Each structure stands twice: as C-alpha cells, then as structure tokens.
Image (cartoon, helix red, strand yellow):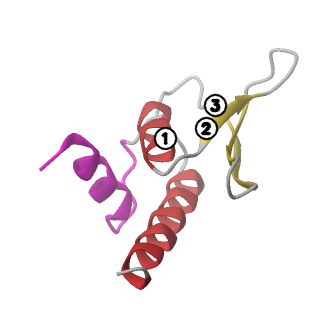
C-alpha cells in the first residue's frame, strides 16, 4: 500500500482519527490537485483551492499549539475524498 493510500484510509476511518496533521491534509489536497494559499499578513489561516475547478474547498486555522488538525477539518477532507472517489468511479 502506497503512503498516500494509508493517509487516505486514515481520513476515511470512523470514528474520526485525532492523529492527522496539517502535513497529512496537504498531502491529500495535493494528491487531488488542490493547492494551499496562505493568508495575508501572517495570519494562521489556510485555504486550499483547485485552480482548474475554481473551487475553494477548505478554509481553516493552522492547528496550534498541537499539530493535529481538528475533527471538522478531517471531516471536510473526508467529504472531498469521497467526492473525488465517486467522480473516478463514474468516469470508468
């Protein structure tokens, strides 16, 4: 199993994993062609967008002082993964 597959399966687990980090979110978002836009002015905000699809999918604050992302971020990423998997299956 590839490393990205392991990360994807962690996001899909129920109950929601509380060990996923911003780095894990970045890997998944990059895998699905979303890129990160940092907030202006040193804010801790993070946005992920897909330029091709013109979609802003996730907007949240960087986790601190812990490095794990909150549950609502994991749930939003899970929704994206499921949406992308459904698109892949419908294109087959």
Residues shaded magenta = 1-19
Name the residue beneath numbered marker 2. Answer: 35
Which residue is painted at 45% across and 71% down in the image? 82
Q: Position of residue 29 (x, y in %)?
A: 51, 45
Name the residue beneath numbered marker 3. Answer: 62
| Nearest to N terminus: mark 2 or mark 3 | 2
The residue sitting at the top extreme is 42
Q: CA distance from mark 2 to mark 3?
A: 15 Å
The residue sitting at the right extreme is 41
* Side of 44 where 14 appears, left or right: left
Which residue is painted at 69% across and 58% down in the image? 53
Tell me if residue 82 comes above or below residue 77 in the rendering.
Answer: below
Q: CA distance from mark 2 to mark 1?
A: 6 Å
| Nearest to N terminus: mark 2 or mark 1 | 1
Name the residue beneath numbered marker 1. Answer: 30
Pick the front one: 22 or 52:
52
The reply to whether dot 3 and dot 1 touch (C-beta < 8 Å) is no
């Amino acid at each position: 199993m590839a490393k990205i597959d392991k990360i994807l399966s962690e996001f899909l687990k129920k109950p929601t994993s509380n060990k996923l980090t911003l780095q894990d979110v970045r890997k998944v978002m990059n895998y699905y062609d979303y890129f990160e836009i940092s907030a202006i002015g040193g804010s801790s905000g993070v946005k992920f967008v897909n330029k091709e699809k013109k979609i802003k999918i996730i907007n949240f604050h960087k986790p601190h002082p812990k490095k794990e992302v909150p549950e609502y971020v994991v749930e939003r990423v899970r929704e994206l993964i499921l949406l992308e998997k459904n698109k892949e299956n419908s294109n087959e």
